[in-house]
Image (tube, grey):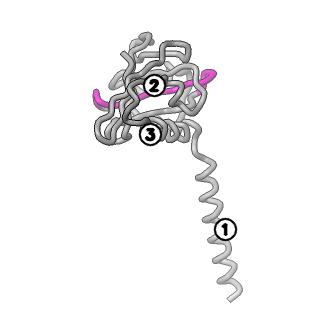
Amino acid sequence: MKSRKTITTIAIGMLFITVLMNLFNNDVWDVNEEMLKEEVISIEQSVETVNLLDVTPFEWDMVYSFDPYTSKEKVYETVGYKWDTISETVSEGMNQIVFMKDEKVVCYLFGYPQNNRYGIYFSGEGFNHVAQRINSNDDLTFQVKKSGDFVYLINY
């Protein structure tokens, strides 16, 4: 009987440690993307324009929007280092956006806007033949377009 309690206690302890590790192991760019998503999809229907700084609940100084089909290697080369949760776009309709602060990734947005419930589109300074880039000192006024449950921020 005592060994059964010990095994149960150990199993519960291991489960608790696993949950804690998952909670604290979320990468900053994933956490920030979730907060960004919440901010963008909560923009009220009557709002026509927003400043990108007002809907990004984290600090950033540069943001890149990568062209469709850009390889992981080109993304890594452009931002200056590799990180583990990156994918390649496989279609023209996907977003692949990287927010940087002090040359570190602070937010990574990837996927179809329809799946994410929001999308961000901009044209900035062409960079490295694979991305558009804007910095936090540029004109960051974005038009807000809502379509059903989806929100699009557009700056062209």
Label 2 vs 3, first from the N-terminus: 3
SS at badge 2: strand
Q: Verify CB contact (< 8 Å) between mark 2 and mark 3.
A: no
**Label 3 secondary element:** loop
SS class of the residue under badge 1?
A: helix
Instruction: Give me the residue at 55% from left, 18% from top.
Output: 136
Does residue 121 appear in this view? no
N-terminal of the pair, mark 2 or mark 1, is: 1
Q: In which quarter of the image is residue 104?
A: top right
Which region is colored magenta? 91-104
Q: Give the foreground label among 2 and 1.
A: 2
Crowding around mark 2 (Cα neighbors within 10 Å: few <14, some 14 to 19, many 20+) is some
Give the distance between the C-alpha atoms of the residues marked 1 and 3, in whole angstroms.
Answer: 38 Å
**Looking at the image, is mark 1 or mark 3 earlier in the sequence?**
1
Residue 28 seen by the camera: yes
Rounded to the nearest angstrom, the CA distance separating label 2 from label 3 is 12 Å
Which of the 4 image quarters holds residue 142?
A: top left
Which percent across, then down, holds residue 78? Answer: 49, 19
Judged by depth in the image, the label closer to the viewer, 1 or 3, is: 3
Amino acid type, callout 1:
Gly
In the picture of the structure, the residue carrying the numbered disc 3 is 42
Is residue 92 found inside the magenta-colored segment of the image?
Answer: yes
User: Residue 99, position in %: x, y?
Assistant: 52, 26
Q: Splitting the image into 4 quarters, where does residue 6 fall?
A: bottom right
Residue tagged by mark 1?
A: 13
Name the residue beneath numbered marker 2. 50
